[in-house]
Amino acid sequence: MNLTQAPVLDTTNLILRGPEERDIEPMIAFLLDQDRAAGFGASPNRGDAWRWFALNVGHWHIHGYGYFTIEIRETGQPAGICGIWNPEGWPEPEIGWVVFEGFEGRGIAYEAATRARQYAYEDLGLKTLTSNIVPGNTRSVALAERLGAGFERSYKNIHMGDEMLYRHPGPAEVLA
């Protein structure tokens, strides 16, 4: 059951779609893993993780965008989330990503983020995007840089503490 009005975005290997009920358990499992989800908002208990999932559903309804579920086209498995995030207290819309355990190192986050950024610029009309990364998350820094984003500044995220803000190239550079 589709819980949002999110479009379905296709890539060569992936389907990016709105959150569905079948995504609750994989997302909760990710958020309960304190080490893996530390830079993303790890939850100390199942109830808080469930509320994070509901927050994403609500984010779609309030903003008209949010985190897509990344689905492997060939198998239908949920492999992570990627999308545009801008809850209360964020400095501006950001593109964020995470892949679940067992899906790292396959280019999934890059493929998903490239398509989500295209959606943000072409369909949502956004003129700029950031990626907000906690210090020490070298994999996300490497991906942001691979996407052409550059370090702009450090700031204090009201939920995550110290973060580094990476600025992505705008629509003129990305969609040219």
Image (tube, rainbow, N blue to C red):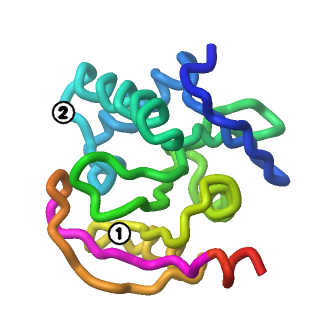
1 or 176, nearer to the observer: 176
Q: Position of residue 164 (x, y in %)?
A: 29, 75
Relative height, residue 50 to residue 137 (above, below):
above
Disc assigned to residue 44: 2
Specify the quadrant that holds the C terminus: bottom right
Q: Quadrant of residue 15?
A: top right
Q: Residue at x 62, y 19 (%)?
A: 2
167 or 142, nearer to the observer: 167
Q: Are marks 2 and 1 in contact (CB under 8 Å)?
A: no
Q: Position of residue 14 (x, y in %)?
A: 75, 46
Q: Residue at x 54, y 50 (%)?
A: 82
Q: Residues within 10 Å of mark 2 (few under 14, many from 20)?
A: few
In this rendering, does residue 29 appear at all? no
Determine if the magenta segment contains residue 162. yes
Q: Residue at x 22, y 53 (%)?
A: 89
Say left or right for 150 vs 14: left
Determine if the magenta segment contains residue 86. no
Instruction: Please name the amino acid that badge 1 sits on.
Output: Asn
- Residue that numbered label 1 is attached to: 137
How far is mark 2 from mark 1, CA to CA? Answer: 20 Å
Relative height, residue 125 to residue 162 (above, below):
above
Q: Residue at x 24, y 35 (%)?
A: 43
In this rendering, does residue 97 appear at all? yes
Q: Quadrant of residue 174?
A: bottom right
Report the magenta stretch's main SS. strand
Q: Which residues are magenta?
A: 161-170
Relative height, residue 49 to residue 168 (above, below):
above
Say left or right for 131 vs 122: left
* SS at badge 1: loop
Instruction: Please name the amino acid that badge 2 sits on.
Output: Pro
Question: Which mark is first along the chain, 1 or 2?
Answer: 2
Q: Residue furthest top?
A: 1
